[in-house]
């Protein structure tokens, strides 16, 4: 929040990490906080998007890569039946295309989660909750969890714990996009379409405030940070 305090903060962090090596301690810069807020439609970056300005991945690049992933997964799971679980809603385009390249017996399932929940309802305390669980029993079966994007890794960490509690034989993760640079929790990713830079991406299922999901390509959206007072917790 205050650039002048960065050396002191880094020293503090170093001490904390020495004292508590088992705890994952991350330093969030002002930009990170704004991005996290924007992701869920809050804060200054959540207003006045300029639109999808730049194509990051063309429809053709995506289709090519999805086919390659499908072939790789088909090879790896030869002779097995899998449960393909998509995380709604961003995953719909990827899941629909990927499954058509899987030459395996499979069952399709979906999971839906909420990051905040309805006031007074599940997830109202800010935690992640499952609002729609898988319908099929997955115990003893091979699960392939499909995501459109892994960003901080927090959703995936939660989902893996949730799925492992159902005692499947295995769980592997397949994500179209990996924003590795923003990771806060290390999560195992077995199949990765593209590693992408720290940009706000939309299209091919990914949204910005519910829009842009129907773009056939993936574009970069540049939200405008309005001038003036930014409402954030007080400077530390
Ligand atoms: C996206 C994506 C992942 C999550 C990853 O979902 O589908 O579930 O964000 O972010 P993380 O690694 O920082 O936890 P989003 O919340 O945008 O919902 P949507 O799929 O309905 O668009």
Image (cartoon, rainbow, N blue to C red):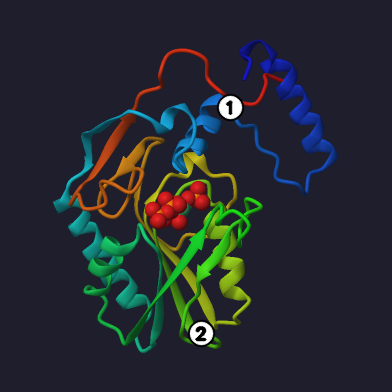
Q: Is residue 186 above or below residue 32?
A: below
Q: Mark 1 and mark 2 in contact? Answer it, CB < 8 Å.
A: no
In the picture, the disc for residue 29 is 1
The percent coordinates of residue 50 (x first, y second) are 27, 28
Residue 149 can be seen in this image:
no
In whole angstroms, how far apart are the C-alphas of marks 1 and 2? 40 Å
- Label 2 secondary element: loop
Q: Is residue 170 above or below residue 140?
A: above
Q: Residues within 10 Å of mark 2 (few under 14, many from 20)?
A: some
The percent coordinates of residue 198 (x first, y second) are 41, 35
Q: Residue at x 61, y 67 (%)?
A: 161
Q: Residues within 10 Å of mark 1 (few under 14, many from 20)?
A: few
Q: Is residue 219 above or below residue 75?
A: above
- Label 1 secondary element: loop
The percent coordinates of residue 39 (x first, y second) are 45, 41
Q: How many marks?
A: 2
Residue 111 appears left or right of 2: left
Residue located farthest toward the top when viewing the structure as drawn: 4
In the picture, the disc for residue 164 is none
Q: Earlier in the sequence, mark 1 or mark 2?
A: 1
Identify residue for label 2: 138
Residue 205 in which image quadrant: bottom left
Residue 36 can be seen in this image:
yes
The percent coordinates of residue 66 (x first, y second) are 25, 62
């Amino acid at each position: 929040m205050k650039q002048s305090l960065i050396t002191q903060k880094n020293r503090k962090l170093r001490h904390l990490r020495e004292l508590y090596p088992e705890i994952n301690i991350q330093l969030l810069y002002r930009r990170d906080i704004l991005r996290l807020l924007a992701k869920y439609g809050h804060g200054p970056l959540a207003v006045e998007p300029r639109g999808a300005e730049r194509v990051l991945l063309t429809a053709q690049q995506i289709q090519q890569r999805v086919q390659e992933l499908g072939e790789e997964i088909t090879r790896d799971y030869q002779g097995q039946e899998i449960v393909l679980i998509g995380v709604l809603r961003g995953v719909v385009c990827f899941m629909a295309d990927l499954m058509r390249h899987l030459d395996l017996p499979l069952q399709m399932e979906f999971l839906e989660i909420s990051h905040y929940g309805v006031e007074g309802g599940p997830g109202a305390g800010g935690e992640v909750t499952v609002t729609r669980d898988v319908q099929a029993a997955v115990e003893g079966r091979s699960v392939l969890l499909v995501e459109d994007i892994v960003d901080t890794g927090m959703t995936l960490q939660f989902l893996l714990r949730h799925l492992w509690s159902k005692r499947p034989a295995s769980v592997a993760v397949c994500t179209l996009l990996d924003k590795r640079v923003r990771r806060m929790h290390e999560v195992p990713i077995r199949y990765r379409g593209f590693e992408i830079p720290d940009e706000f991406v939309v299209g091919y299922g990914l949204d910005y405030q519910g829009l842009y999901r129907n773009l056939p390509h993936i574009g970069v959206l540049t939200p405008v940070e309005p001038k003036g007072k930014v409402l954030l917790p007080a400077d530390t």
